[in-house]
Amino acid sequence: MPKPIRFSQHAREQMAERGATEDEVVEAVRAGEQVPAKRGRLGYRRNLQYDRLWGGRTYAIKQVLAIIVEESDAIIVVTVYTFYF
């Protein structure tokens, strides 16, 4: 069974500000590409079909990048970035 994914308060704030949902972040962590991150952390990024308006423009793709810390009993999402193309 995979480890549960938990969200820091900072990650939740960044998700709201940057337009990422909890489901999108979980998908990025579970099925995304692993990339190195600062301070020994890991990042997981996933491109998602979007085809919607964000910030006054329509974008086809939204990339979600979750920065995580893996603990013995859980994966902690510490921050989230989004990129729109």
Image (cartoon, rainbow, N blue to C red):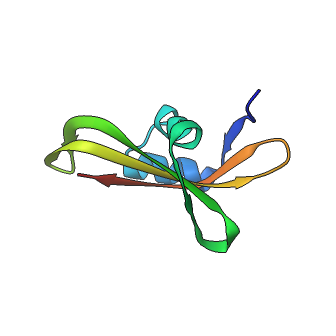
Q: Which residue lies furthest to the bottom in this view?
A: 39
59 and 40: which one is in front? 40
Q: Which residue lies furthest to the left in this view?
A: 57
User: What residue lies at 69% left-to-right and 69% top-to-bottom?
Assistant: 40
Q: Quick check: 41 above or below 73?
A: below
Count of marks placed on residues: 0
Q: Where is residue 15 in the image (x, y as percent from the top left)?
A: 47, 47
User: What residue lies at 71% left-to-right and 45% top-to-bottom?
Assistant: 75
User: What residue lies at 27% left-to-right and 36% top-to-bottom?
Assistant: 50
Would residue 83 appear left or right of 14 to someone viewing this image?
left
Q: Which residue lies furthest to the right in this view?
A: 72
Q: Quick check: 64 above or below 5?
A: below
24 and 33: which one is in front? 33
User: What residue lies at 70% left-to-right and 56% top-to-bottom?
Assistant: 69
Q: Position of residue 72 (x, y in %)?
A: 85, 47
Q: Position of residue 29 (x, y in %)?
A: 57, 43
Indicate the quadrant containing the N terminus: top left, top right, bottom left or bottom right.
top right
Q: Where is residue 64 in the image (x, y as percent from the top left)?
A: 43, 48
